[in-house]
Image (cartoon, rainbow, N blue to C red):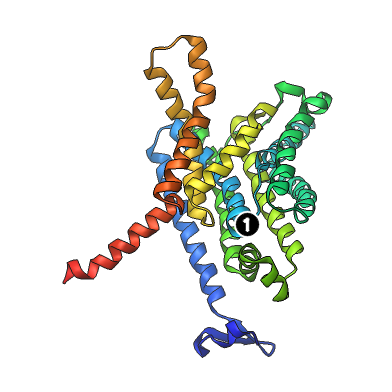
Amino acid sequence: MSATRAALPPTQQLVDKGRPVDRRRGSTLLRHLAIMLVVGLLLVGVSYAVEPFRNFQLATVAAYLCATAGLTVLTGLNGQLSLGHGALMATGAYTVALCQTAFADRGMTGGWLLPLSLGAAIVSTVAVGAVVGVAAARLRGPYLAGVTLAVAVVVPALAVTFDGVFNGEQGLSVPVEPPPLSLGPYFPYERWQLWATGAATLLALLLLANLIRSRYGRTFRAVRDDEVAARLAGIHVARTQVLAFVVSAATAGLGGALLAVLAQSVSPGAFSLTLSLFLLMAVVIGGLGRLTGALWGAVLLVALPDLTHSLTDALTLSPAVAQRLEGNLPLAIFGLTLIVVMIAAPGGVQGLLSRLGRVLLAKWPTRRS
């Protein structure tokens, strides 16, 4: 019996084949299921209340959330720095494009085709993530960042090199079937996009949330805090790091596949090195180690282009200057936001909100009395 389980009260222990089992595992799963159900119902309600473009934006946030949540697990919980998650998203995006195109060429139809393509995208990204993870487990610090940076540069370049398969810079189209007829002949396509993307993202978040609260999540944090102590405690450090990279790669591949489905196209320019940098800065700004922080980062990734476009429209500039400014302004805004957040709230946006919540809860009894 482990010390952790032995310390549990008898009411929180069950006996399974002579071994005590923590009852809180079941309650945690039920709590996560309830939260996801409530969020899903809220998304359905919001999809009817907002215009189609906002539905598309929310679906894009959900797609980015898959990638930022996985990167949060890798960097925030396991301590591995990755600058190549944009390339992992590209792997998933191109896989779903190739699968959907193959299905369309063969005249295959059915609601099961898109989930099958998304599954293939996850599998292919897991394979790439396992290869990169094995190499990353042997490296530390700037060397690890250098390897993932090379992946971010090499993977999109492969699409240009093998243009016979990936169609070079023009990319591939992603054939997607219309919403099911059971929803009605005039069901808005953007609403269907939000429903499908939101369902996939909520399922991924449910798995990640339970993974974080399991023993695997504890080993992730142990390796992050002190590898020597973790190794002395019997944890296989390299295997844990590879597992964290594979999990993060799987969610990044799902996020890239969902983005390709939303845009109905995929090209190397959509998954450049800049996207990898944006993803890393987004999770740091949102709050490392927290899935809610990953949500804030995903919102920022979608809101930033609109903010940039609004600023360039508000300024009276020549077309050439406006185009150059619109291309460089997002990175500048992200950098400034990162500096401000790190100074004002080192724990990110979610850390600041949590701290404010604790202060309000501490003052609440005084106000009530």
Residue at the disc numbered 1: 79
Q: Residue furthest top?
A: 318
Up-down: is 297 above or below 238?
above
Q: In front: 122, or 155?
A: 155
- What's the residue at 68%, 90% (across, down)? 18
- Left or right: where does residue 263 sit relative to residue 34? right
Marker count (numbered): 1
Name the residue rendered at 63%, 54% in the picture. Answer: 74
What element does badge 1 sit on? loop
Give the residue drawn at x 75%, y 68%.
236
Counting from the top left corner in percent of width and height, residue 263 is at: 60, 30
Residue 237 coordinates in the image, percent (x, y):
73, 65
**Front-lying residue, 273 or 167:** 273
Q: Residue at x 67, y 40 (%)?
A: 89
Whether residue 315 appears in this view of the structure is yes
Task: State which quarter of the image contains the C terminus.
Answer: bottom left
* Closer to us: 189 or 200: 200
Where is residue 155 shown, x and y percent of the image? Answer: 75, 35
Q: Is residue 103 above or below residue 140?
A: above
Left or right: 174 as drawn, with respect to 331: right
Q: Does 357 appear above or below 175?
A: below
Q: Quadrant of residue 159?
A: top right
Q: Is residue 176 visible?
A: no
Image quadrant holding the N terminus, namely bottom right
For label 1, the crowd category at 10 Å Cα-Cα, with few meaning under 14, some 14 to 19 and many 20 or more, is many
Going by the numbered disc 1, the residue's amino acid type is: Gly
